[in-house]
Structure formats: C-alpha cells, structure tokens
Amino acid sequence: MHSVILGTGSAAPENVVTNHDLEKIMDTSDEWIVQRTGIKSRHISLPGEKFSDFALPASRLALERAGLEATDIDFIFAGTMTPDYLMPAGACSVQALLGAEKATAMDVCAACSGFIYGLSIADKYLRCDPTLNILVIGGEIVSHHLDWDDRTTAVLFGDAVGAAVIGARADGHRILAVETGSNGNLGELLYIQGTGSATPVTRDFDIKDNYIQMRGREIFKHAIKNMVEVSNRALANAGKTVEEITKIIPHQANMRIIEMLAKQFKKPMEEVFVNIDRYGNTSAGTIPVALNEAATTGFLEPGDLVLLTVFGGGLTWAAAVVEW
C-alpha cells in the first residue's frame, strides 16, 4: 500500500485580465511583462468572489475523479493564506459546503508551498492509517493583496485553486517521497505586513500594509537554490536520480525561474509543464492547478516519474516525487 493520487481538480475565476488590460491602468506593456515573467494573462476574482467559490468545484471534481463521495473524506488540508475568513479556516468552509461531515479540517499556511506541505501531511497520516481518504487543497485569492499601482508585483499574480484526493492503494499514481523546508530569517523578502497581530486593523490602518511586498532579485536567487536542494532530497529519499525524471511540474512564479530549473536538471522544456502564461503566479494554487491540467491534457503519461517543486514566502519550499 502506498499513498496515491486518486483524483485531481481545479477552478479559477471566469474573469481574465490580459497584459493589454493592465496597460490601461498602469505604466507597463505586454512586451515588458512577457519578457520578464512569461505571463500573458491571469484570472482575477470579481468583487464578492472568495476562496471557497473555487475550492468547492475543484474539490468536487477531484472527488468525482477519485470515485469517492464527500462523506468518504477523513481529513481536509487547505494550503492557503487567503481563506474566506480569518476564522473559521478555509478548510472548514469547504468542509461545510461539501458536506464532508466526518472530516477533520484545517489550513496549512505556507504561502506558495501550501499544497505540497499539505501533501506531506497527508502522506504521513496515510503511513500511520492507510484506511484514510484525504482531500488536499491549494490556492488563493491573492488579487486582494495586490497594489494595482505597483507594476513590479501586480502583474505577477492571479487567482485559482486546485485540489487532489489522496488515499492508500496498492496501485495508482504513487507518492514516493515528499520533502519540505523553510527559513523564517528571510521572511521579509516576501511578505504581507498587515492584518496579523503585529499590524492589526485599526482606525489608522494603512491599506498598503495589506499588499504583497517582495524583493524580487533576492527571491529569484533563493528560489532556484532551495527548489534544487529540496528536489534532490526528495529524489534521494525516493531512491531515484535526476536522470530518471521524465516530467517536471514546477512552481509557476516566473518563466525565467522555470527555465533555470530545467537547465539545472538538464531537462528540455518539452518535459516541463508550463501554464504561467495563462494563470500567472497563483501562489499555493500553482502546483495543484498545473498537476490537474498536466493529468487531464495528456502531458503526464503512465510510467512517468514526476517531480513537483515549489518555493514561497516564509520563506518556504517543498518537493514531491510521484510515479505516475
């Protein structure tokens, strides 16, 4: 019996904002954005839309593909930093909407790494009790934390949510290893200052404290270094080598980072899944949304050895090796 991926799903707002749309509201251009990031468009939620509006259909689709009902789920882990409310947890909101009455639900706040962190927890639970069925969600409504006057950050992000149902089976898409890491000493390279207990919302609250702050050049350097390191650890624990990898599903943060990872692992871009051009960086949503699309479009084929790798605020990073 191994931890296996039983089904995947994803969902995103219908509202699509292109680079040409952004040209109308800020000092930028389609050429500038594409050259530096690889992003051409992104899904942006409309007023009133929230995390659970997309986590719910993504979860239902994953359950349908897994051949399970919501009442079969024992745990729900939601990797997100943008739940519907500060309390209850986003996972609890999804639990109620799904009708997953027997599930224990909780959020995993690790920024972009949230989904693979949740995958790690699910894998460890299943090693203890293989009778469990676990729903792992990852995604954000990150547009609520963007300063639309700041072209260095606003053009990068989008909204989307993905989900996967994990269980223990003798056959299936086997999770061979999951590794995680973090460095809180570097947290201020990528952070949101406001709404926490250090900067609570008061009458004098500065709305700029609600926006993502990022030191891009330093993030780029740490992202490459730590994604390569954690991927090598995951491969070693899986008993696999870099040469055996047939497909890579990387964090969709910047096309330059994706290309650099492919170069580090000596893989052609044809073996690397990319959807950043259509989604931008959806934080914890990048890996599960990309995994779902890779699984349902034929990019992943039986027998593939798949590397999932991610980097996010915290700073956090994680990788998983899956035998498809």
Image (cartoon, helix red, strand yellow):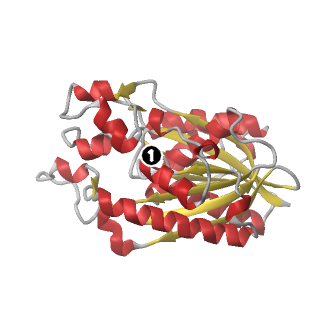
Quarter in which the N terminus is drawn:
bottom right
Q: Secondary structure at mark 1?
A: helix
In the picture as drawn, the residue positioned furthest to the right comes out as 170
125 or 319: nearer the eye? 319
From the viewer's perspective, is residue 268 above or below residue 11? below
Please give the residue where the numbered disc 1 appears in the rendered image. Answer: 255
Would residue 111 appear left or right of 274 to someone viewing this image?
A: left
Position of 217 with respect to 230 (left or right) is left
Q: Position of residue 58 (x, y in %)?
A: 59, 36
Q: Where residue 267 sits: x, y (%)?
A: 62, 53
Q: Residue at x 47, y 32 (%)?
A: 278
Seen from the viewer's position, the closer of residues 63 and 5 is 5
Q: Nearer the viewer, residue 64 or 37?
A: 37
Residue positioned 49% across, 50% down in the render: 259
Point out residue 201 in the picture as x, y percentages from the top left corner: 21, 54
Determine whether, in the image, residue 40 is placed left or right of residue 164. left
Q: How many marks?
A: 1
Q: Which residue is situated farthest in the left direction here?
A: 204
| Residue at screen point 36% across, 30% down | 48
- Camera-side residue of 96 and 30: 30
**Compared to 316, does 263 lie above or below?**
above
Which residue is found at the position 78% from the left and 65% from the top? 129
Check disc 1: other Cα within 10 Å, few if <14, some if 14-19, many if 20+. Answer: many
Residue 149, given in percent of the width and then of the height, sits at: 18, 39
The image shows residue 87, relative to residue 275, as above or below, that is below
Residue 14 can be seen in this image: yes
User: Can the viewer see residue 156?
Assistant: no
Q: Quadrant of residue 62?
A: top right
The residue sitting at the bottom extreme is: 185
Badge 1 amino acid:
Met
